[in-house]
Amino acid sequence: MVSDLIHFIGEEFVEWEKAIVEGLWSLRRSSIQQDEWGAEYVRVKTVAIEANKILKKKGIHRITSRKCGFLLRRMGIQVGPRRAEGWPVWWDEEQMKRLAKMFGIE
């Protein structure tokens, strides 16, 4: 029974991660901001909202911003320290291409 639960949670994590990567790619053009040094970022909350839109279409439980930040860090995407507008997710084009290829996203 425990192994079934772990298997279920593992599958759901993969779906959440895939939705997060899809969400990041869809936000690439519209919501990327630049900080004072020219580094590109998007907020964790914005990524979570976009991922939830994708998950809703698939009929999967939604994720919170906190869980989204946890999964982003777990995938190796750099999440910066909290700012006034929220937690920034630093845009790394090479890493995003690698993750998109891993999840089969074009």
Image (cartoon, rainbow, N blue to C red):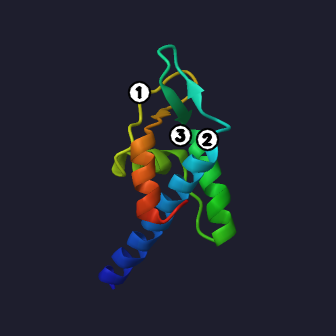
Q: What kind of residue is marked 2?
A: Thr
| Disc nearer the start of the sequence (1/2) | 2
Name the amino acid, label 3. Answer: Val
Task: Pick whichever, 15 or 103, lies toward us.
Answer: 103
The Cα–Cα distance between marks 1 and 2, rounded to whole angstroms, is: 16 Å
Q: Quadrant of residue 45?
A: top right
The residue to which callout 2 is attached is: 46
Residue 57 rendering spot, x and y as whole percentages: 69, 67
Q: Residues within 10 Å of mark 2 (few under 14, many from 20)?
A: some
The residue at 44%/50% (across/down) is: 97
- Please give the name of the residue rendered at 39% of the width and 53% of the height, measured from the top-left corner: 98
Dot 3 corresponds to which residue?
A: 44
**Residue 84 picture quarter:** top right
Spot occupied by residue 64 in the image (x, y as percentages of width and height) = 55, 50
Q: Find out whether the residues at labels 1 and 3 contact each other: C-beta distance under 8 Å.
A: no
Residue at the extreme top of the image, as rendered: 36
Dot 1 amino acid type: Pro
Q: Position of residue 63 (x, y in %)?
A: 55, 56
**Residue marked by disc 1:** 81
Q: Residue at x 56, y 55 (%)?
A: 22
The answer to whether marks 2 and 3 mark residues whose Cβ atoms lie closer than 8 Å is yes
Q: Residues within 10 Å of mark 3 (few under 14, many from 20)?
A: many
